[in-house]
Image: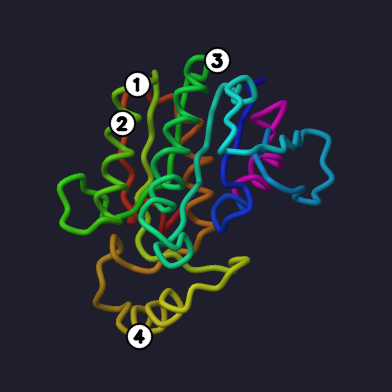
Amino acid sequence: MKTALVVGATGLIGKHLTIKLLNSGLYSTVKVIIRKTLQINHPKLEEIIFDFDNFDNSKIKADDIFCCLGTTMKQAGSKANFYKVDFTYPLETAKAGLTNGAQQFLIVTAMSSNSNSLFYYNRVKGDIEQAIEQLGFPTFQIFRPSMLAGEREKARFGEKIGKVVMDFFAFIIPDKYKVIEGEKVAQAMLAFAQKGFTGKLIHESDKFQNL
């Protein structure tokens, strides 16, 4: 069986994805790149304590790499810090993984990803999609969820307000733009990882709603 590696395993999507990968029976080993233990006891789990600012390429080794890294401008505190988390770290992970034999890279970006956007957040998301595509993975899958819902370690007030408003108008909002649970995105990543796709694929949020 194959080996999976999750980057961003403590986040909203990453924590659900890690559990699903461990329970799926598709992988003999599920590695997680973390700064502190997940406190999960599972025979297939391999925790790798990792410092992204002192990057060790040799530790990024798996058949399938799932990247769920992401922050906000508020949490990052500056454009430079945001760029590191949402562009530099994912790109370094992808480069190291490909060098070490990874066949598939799956990443969560955003519905509004666009390298030509006037908005910095959207532009960085679009830039990381393009940068990883250029590396030439046999399979590269992009997941672009709409506004996320679910329990986070650090609550995001804007998301809470947005969810209330969007839930109220849910009956007239197309599926692509509806609030999506982080667990559904994780389920989509697991489902599409095993499809045997090749090349680049982009999955918009409406594909996740009914999985």
Dot placed on the residue nearer the N-terminal end, 3 or 1: 3
Q: Are marks 4 and 2 in contact (CB under 8 Å)?
A: no
Judge whether 11 appears above or below 3 on screen: below
Residue 44 rendering spot, x and y as whole percentages: 77, 33
Instruction: Say which quarter of the image contains residue 152.
Output: bottom right
* Disc 1 packing (10 Å; few <14; some 14–19; many ≥20): few
Q: Residue at x 64, y 30 (%)?
A: 26
In this rendered view, identify the residue nearer to me: 9 or 63. 9
Q: Type of residue at label 1?
A: Leu
Q: Which residue is mark 3?
A: 100
In this rendered view, identify the residue nearer to me: 125 or 144. 125
Q: Which mark is residue 135?
A: 1
Q: Which mark is residue 168?
A: 4
Residue 210 rendering spot, x and y as whole percentages: 43, 57
Q: Type of residue at label 4?
A: Phe
- In the visual, does 144 lie left or right of 65? left
Q: Which residues are magenta?
A: 17-30
Dot placed on the residue nearer the N-terminal end, 4 or 2: 2
Q: Type of residue at label 2?
A: Ala
